[in-house]
Image (tube, rainbow, N blue to C red):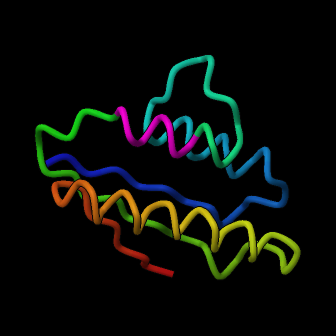
Amino acid sequence: MMDIELDFTKCKYVSEIHNVLKDGFVFPDYYGNNLSALWDCLRNYDFDNNIMISIIGTSKVPDELREYMGKILNIFSRVHQEEPNIRFEIIS
């Protein structure tokens, strides 16, 4: 099993959220830093192995980013529905 940790604790801007995603998933340099690019990259991710994604700090993002973070979590849920080998665990 592969473990990935996404820590959003220090994110104050959307760009910082996407930096965490890009680094955590090791997305390519051309990652577009938006929700469509996140969906596209996750849909093409290698799911041959079981992957556990630990999500940290969602409750720490500023209020103005909570709706955006909710959209990211929705994408994660959709990915899990289509690819049961990838699981997401919200820690905080």
Task: Kindly indicate the quadrant of the structure image that contains residue 89.
Answer: bottom left
Q: In this view, does 62 lie above or below 54?
A: below
Q: Where is residue 14 in the image (x, y as percent from the top left)?
A: 79, 53
Tell me which residue sits at (74%, 59%) in the image.
Answer: 11
In-image side of 91 versus 37 (left or right) = left
Q: Position of residue 7 (x, y in %)?
A: 55, 59
Q: Where is residue 37 in the image (x, y as percent from the top left)?
A: 60, 37
Tell me which residue sits at (43%, 76%) in the image.
Answer: 90
Main secondary structure along the magenta-highlighted residues: helix
Q: In this view, does 46 lie above or below 55?
A: above
Identify the residue at the far right of this view. Answer: 64
In-image side of 54 versus 39 (left or right) = left
Q: Where is residue 15 in the image (x, y as percent from the top left)?
A: 79, 44
Tell me which residue sits at (66%, 40%) in the image.
Answer: 19
Please tell me which residue lies in front, 39 or 66: 39
> Magenta stretch?
38-44
Tell me which residue sits at (60%, 46%) in the image.
Answer: 20
Task: Kindly indicate the quadrant of the structure image that contains residue 34.
Answer: top right
Please tell me which residue lies in front, 9 or 42: 42
Residue 78 sits inside the magenta stretch? no
